[in-house]
Amino acid sequence: MLRIAVPNKGMLSEPAWNILSEAGYRLRSNPRQLVVEDPDNEIELFYLRPLDIAVYVGRGTIDVGITGRDLLLNSGTEAIEHMQLGFGASTFRFAAPNDAPIHELADIDGKRVASSYDKLVSDYLTGHGIHADIIHLDGAVESSVQLGVADLIADVVSTGTTLRNAGLRVFGDPILHSEAILIRSPRLDAEDGRLTVLGRRLQGVLTAQRYVLMDFDIPVEKVSAAVAITPGFESPTVSPLHDKQWAAVRVMVPKAQVNQLMDRLYDVGARAIIVTALQASRM
């Protein structure tokens, strides 16, 4: 069986459970279950702390896992990023007090930096020739400056409201753009058939989430213009109609662009536009 680790809590947990469920895998029926066997799909799910997933996968005791890129890099393990999963996006940034003379990367040299991701920060600064004292804290790092523990912090930033409320401002380039990823053990071949099936199913869910199927009729002389408007995920399918002056077009388009594309298609003469949600393949 393929052993898969999923977060048991945190911001990545529910989206991770949802994508596996939509891919056709069995999940736990109560929050106390730590292991779920799914013999029909030949997998075992292990619900683990998000911080530990990369460690288990890196050591080969678990075959694959769902975690954040930031957690993988901070773990220092040999686990390998295998596939992006399209959720849990975050940006890792430096932030300093509003009145501090810290405005660029070079200003960090010799300073104290508080972070929950000390290895990630240390590797980044070392790679840029910056020497700093990295102070590990488990959460609420924005309080460290006010309490005199650090001169600045490195943390995940979304809206920046928490930092502003703490009298901090973001500066410099992002340390890392993170998101949820599927990682694999260095002991698991990237071409392993079990991993291929898992990846295909997850990609099917991602495609169904991002795209819809659009069908419309268009005058034959306008087909090229319509196809240029809707290049789609794959090449459009163009079929002749009984009325030889018209053709039917079927194309997969980004869900976020549907209204805009419909307006443009009507402008070039399309009619009978139908939009259909996709179903994730479980083959």
Image: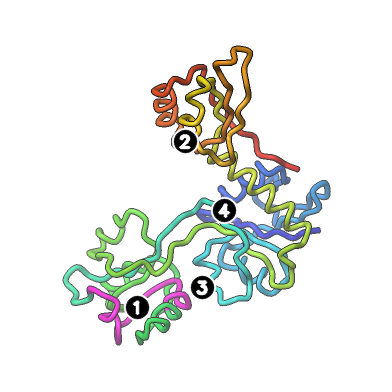
Q: Amino acid at mark 4?
A: Leu
User: In the rendering, at what x and y percent does residue 30 appear?
Assistant: 68, 46
The coloring applied to the image is rainbow
Name the residue carrying label 3.
Answer: 74
| For marks 2 and 1 on the same chain, the one whose residue lies earlier in the sequence | 1
Residue under the point 28% across and 78% down: 151
Q: Give the amino acid at mark 3.
A: Asn
Q: Residues within 10 Å of mark 1 (few under 14, many from 20)?
A: many
**Along the line of sight, the residue nearer the viewer: 48 or 245:** 245
Question: What is the residue that sits farthest to the top in this orientation?
Answer: 243
Mark 2, Cα crowd under 10 Å, few <14 / some 14-19 / many 20+, is few
Q: CA distance from mark 4 to mark 3?
A: 19 Å
Q: Which residue is mark 2?
A: 228
Residue at image position (56%, 35%) is 252
Is residue 117 shown in magenta? yes
Residue shown at 72%/46% (left/top)? 25
Figure quadrant of the C terminus: top right
Residue matched to label 4: 85
Asked where in the image residue 113 lies, by quadrant, the reply is bottom left
First in sequence, mark 1 or 4: give its number. Answer: 4
Going by the numbered disc 1, the residue's amino acid type is Val
Task: Look at mark 1 in the image and give the residue it sits on.
Answer: 113
Say above or below: 30 vs 279.
below
